[in-house]
Amino acid sequence: MSGRSFSAGMLLLAILALAAASGPVAAASGDAGAQNEITSFTLDNGMQVVVIPDHRAPIVTHMVWYKVGSADEPPGKSGIAHFFEHLMFKGTTNHKAGEFGTRIAEIGGSENAFTTDDYTAYYQTVPPDALGTMMEFEADRMRNLILTDEVIGPERDVILEERRSRIENSPQALLAEEIDATLYQNHPYRIPVIGWMHEIKKLNRVDAVAFYDRYYAPNNAILIVAGDVEASRVRELAENTYGKVARGPVLPPRVRPTEPEQNTARTVTLSDPRVSVPSFSRSWLVPSYHIAEPGEAEALDLLSEILGGGVRSRLYQALVVKSGVASSAGAYFDGSRLDQSSFVVYGAPRGTARLDAVETAVDAEIASIVKDGVTPQELESAKNRFLRAMIFARDDQNSMANIYGSSLATGESVKDVTEWPDRIRAVTADQVQRAAARYLATNHSVTGYLLPADPVQN
Amino acid sequence: MSGRSFSAGMLLLAILALAAASGPVAAASGDAGAQNEITSFTLDNGMQVVVIPDHRAPIVTHMVWYKVGSADEPPGKSGIAHFFEHLMFKGTTNHKAGEFGTRIAEIGGSENAFTTDDYTAYYQTVPPDALGTMMEFEADRMRNLILTDEVIGPERDVILEERRSRIENSPQALLAEEIDATLYQNHPYRIPVIGWMHEIKKLNRVDAVAFYDRYYAPNNAILIVAGDVEASRVRELAENTYGKVARGPVLPPRVRPTEPEQNTARTVTLSDPRVSVPSFSRSWLVPSYHIAEPGEAEALDLLSEILGGGVRSRLYQALVVKSGVASSAGAYFDGSRLDQSSFVVYGAPRGTARLDAVETAVDAEIASIVKDGVTPQELESAKNRFLRAMIFARDDQNSMANIYGSSLATGESVKDVTEWPDRIRAVTADQVQRAAARYLATNHSVTGYLLPADPVQN
């Protein structure tokens, strides 16, 4: 079960790496034939299904997304969503632990799973004729897991060790946790997806069973199948597997506590002997695609691209290329969230440059956009990069499945995803400037500093 | 209903003003006759009763403490505990709104109520022959409130206005809220007692009824009667009033999410045109009396007294008297909490002195105690001030009732309160030094800065 992502940021970076764009990316439509059309339907038990045909290679990606993540956990039970993801690889009443994985390996497939604040997903990439088998196994573990203390105890130790190695051993990860805990004063996004050590230690069978019975049901799941398969075949297989699973309890809307007005500038500083080069990040609360006013999240996406998306961005050009004060500088926006999200800028000094010089230079680039906006050329170029990224993403089955799954699991529709390129095209320079002016004020930001143990500067 | 305290800090300051000590203060025992002995018993329906006789004046303080505060509120419902305190002054099936208050005024009594993170209390001070009437009214509103939309809607507006005037109009209060939200990463103490504006706006009848039915019941209440009355009479009156109220639902132990390990130094800065003199505070998580190891909370109490309790403290002497860098400087520790509490130091510069000079000087005083400890004379003197404060507190009926009520509502016993002076006497200089060394490290503190709008310094 290695390589499981447990952070929204990590998933985002994975999608970014594939798609080079942080927003949802549209599907093949218009320029592709009917055989490549995306199909969406719902099984009688409430399970949503999306089929993304791609016949260029005899391979299929099969994903099930549960609309539950760490932000849905009961207070004091941090980590149960991610814990549960681990438990899904244990035995069921029909299959021993490891049997599913062994089968996938035998047919030359691959599998993985990940948990974020908003969703938990499981996927396998296999030859098309194994799709039915994947569905059988996946539908089986949706309801038939054996959750005994003998299963849960040892897995808790695995997760504690995972936390030690990924978080406790990483000053950067520890700092990131406390930045989130500071940025979000009320919303459960302040709680780490993997959970806090002292709460993971107490997770038990009762917690696991309650979580499973509440959230692991077809009416809380989305099936995404991308690859060399027809929608009619997917429907037939899905009805014979998932379709036989009884509908679960009716879940209330996913309403989590929202943020109060924030009035302060906050800093979070971690000094650690394992840090050699200081760095900083600054985060602001901004709306996600799901809660933004029309065009606002698209403008934030383009703002992050123009300000700090790669080597052609303002931050990189000004700080790394021209003045050379920074070894790295950039910005990102995570729009694929159910609730309020964050916009982040970051930087680290080069050589003997001071961290505060980097911070000042980053602030100057933001101030410049707030005051003078962006140029038509910059905007056009950023849009083109996004739209090209979408075209590349289309080439990757796994990436397309991820984009649809994460969008649908965070309240977007198939239509929202397919129309995204048009909405990006429509963003004006004025909208980008207004997004910067509205959201990027230092007096309600959270700045993180990662410093060597004996800070000589800040 | 003016003058209601809604913050634990405010109540603490009120007790401090009366008792000049932040810890629980012991009752008259040993040196007082049997007629002044404190009595504690429980009614059949689970209501705890404490009687503190005081026959020096024909007056009695009658208090009911509910073991519910803002930290027990459901997620997203911040402010419901305090909101409910307001609703308790509305009509019941037996008495019109205002009738209770009018009766108290007629007999020359006074009344008030307050809500904190951990408890909600109601009290009246009246002539002894009115005690039965107070109990009748108080027992009546424990269960017979009329909670309609017509009652709740207008009161919500009152509370929104209260929040505007007490919080939104006060940069200091706004900063204090965000310091708490930063200091507590997981525990509901991070949420303001009065509630967040956007959540208060949504509180409704369903929330109020659920809160009332769950928490307002004799088995979740403590009756404290202090004054010119005998325990036998209190028991008789209580059995005839509160004793007739049915036991409520069995409540699970008050287990709230606890804090993870904190690894960072954080700052929270509010710049506001209404601020003329800058100031800072630094807070650390420390154990309350309820969760501390034996002697630890007592040591923190004495540490706060030696470091920053009044004009003879180290901070005041060094910063205000000797160097004159500060116009104010001090420390306080709020030990009367159910869960993890905070230890706070603060200071403000005098004249043209810089805020950072004050901060550095405060740090130096802490470092000095961590390194060299406190002197036997300082410790003895601090203990004597605490024990004298206890003697003064004994002279104030209301103060004694408050001390017992707040201690019992935060998990302490009557014995814990009466034995507190002995435990204070037993604290060693070494314990005080160890408390400072263990808890007051800057690398896991939260520092708040209140600055003029155009900060020229920090």
Image: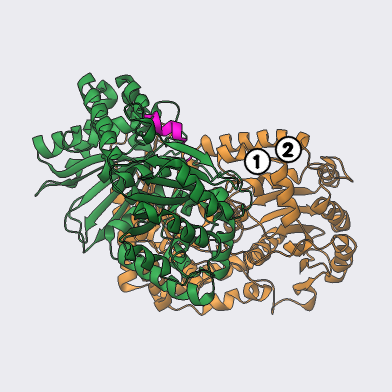
Chain colours: A green, B orange
Residue B412: % across, % down? 63, 70
Dividing the picture into quadrants, the one containing residue B135 is bottom right
For residue A240, side relative to residue B4 (left or right): left
Dividing the picture into quadrants, the one containing residue A450 is bottom left
Dividing the picture into quadrants, the one containing residue B314 is bottom left
Q: Name the residue under label 1.
A: B203
Q: In this view, does B59 lie above or below A14?
A: below
For residue A71, side relative to residue A350 (left or right): right
Which amino acid type is marked by label 1?
Answer: Leu
Decide whether residue A414 is among the magenta residues: yes
Q: In this view, does B150 lie above or below A70?
A: above
Query: Is residue A68 or residue A447 the one in the foreground?
Result: A68
Chain letter for mark 1? B
For residue B127, side relative to residue B209 (left or right): right
Q: Is residue B177 visible?
A: no
Which amino acid type is marked by label 2?
Answer: Ile
Q: Mark 2 points at which residue?
A: B152
Decide whether residue B181 is among the magenta residues: no
- Which residue is pictured at 27% across the width and 32% down the height? A386
Residue A368: % across, % down? 23, 26
Q: Report the span colored magenta.
A: A410-420
Q: How many labels does the image show?
A: 2
Assign a secondary structure to mark 2. Answer: helix
- Which residue is pictured at 50% across the width and 42% down the height? B173
Query: N-terminal of the two: label 2 or label 1?
Result: 2
Residue A18: % across, % down? 26, 44
Q: Residues within 10 Å of mark 1 (few under 14, many from 20)?
A: some
Q: Is residue A442 above or below residue A71?
A: above
Q: Tell me the distance, in whole angstroms, between the alpha carbons under discs 2 and 1.
A: 9 Å
